[in-house]
Amino acid sequence: MNLAGMARATVMSSDVRATRSQPRLARLIVGRNELRRPSDRIEGAVLVALSAAFLVVAVMAVFLAAHVYQAQRAFAADLRPAVAVLSGPGPVLFSQAGPVAQASWRLSNGTDRSGLLSAEIAPAIYGARTGTSVQVWLNRSGEPQLPPAGQREIVVTALIAGFIVTVGAVGLPMLSYRLCRLVLDRHRLARWGSAWAATGPLWTSRQLCSRELILSHYLPA
């Protein structure tokens, strides 16, 4: 081999090593490879699109967690504690009548209001006697609401919301990429099969001719 051929072979081998050292996404998009097929370019474009979608959803997950945190903080800040007095006996545990009790409470402007308290809003009504005072949380309209969550519960809820969205952002692109690879691999195998069907008989006939020439050269007539 002459010097030019050796230099060309060295450059090709260095290009192959550089291409193999690149990540799969870089090889599919910007890698120098004359054998790159259209299906490889499609796979690279899909990877770019899915990566961009993952980044967008990841940023949305952060904003969602922040929104959930702020919403719960605003809900808790909108409530004020009050004392309600039961007008009748509280429900018995596992009662079929429903866990509610009649009660009355006073608003911040001094107005008295009465209504039904559920066990979710005031858990202390279970088994309570008439005239028992229980704590309730009122909104700006003076209606009893569920007790506000603590700071730790608010943070955990926000983190869980962001985590669920992040898991979906990871799982859906991975599943989409797997399906894309499955379709593209089937297309590649089909093209390889058709190409082999066209070139295989020619290659086999050449091999048989070469074998016959070798045998006729070494074996006596």
Image (cartoon, grey):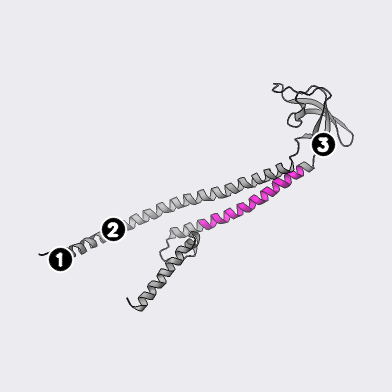
Residue at 53% across / 58% down in the picture?
48
Amino acid type for the residue under numbered disc 2:
Gly
Amino acid type for the residue under numbered disc 1:
Tyr
The quadrant in which residue 146 appears is: top right
The quadrant in which residue 77 appears is: top right
The kind of secondary structure element at disc 3 is strand
Residue nearest the observer in this picture, 218 or 109? 218
Q: CA distance from mark 1 to mark 2?
A: 27 Å
Residue at 33% across / 58% down in the picture?
195
Q: Position of residue 166 (x, y in %)?
A: 60, 49
**Residue at image mark 1:** 218
Q: Position of residue 164 (x, y in %)?
A: 61, 45
Does residue 201 show up magenta in the picture? Answer: no
Residue nearest the observer in this picture, 199 or 74? 74
Question: Which residue is most to the bottom?
Answer: 3
What's the magenta region? 47-75
**Residue at image mark 3:** 81
Marking on residue 200? 2
Q: Earlier in the sequence, mark 1 or mark 3?
A: 3
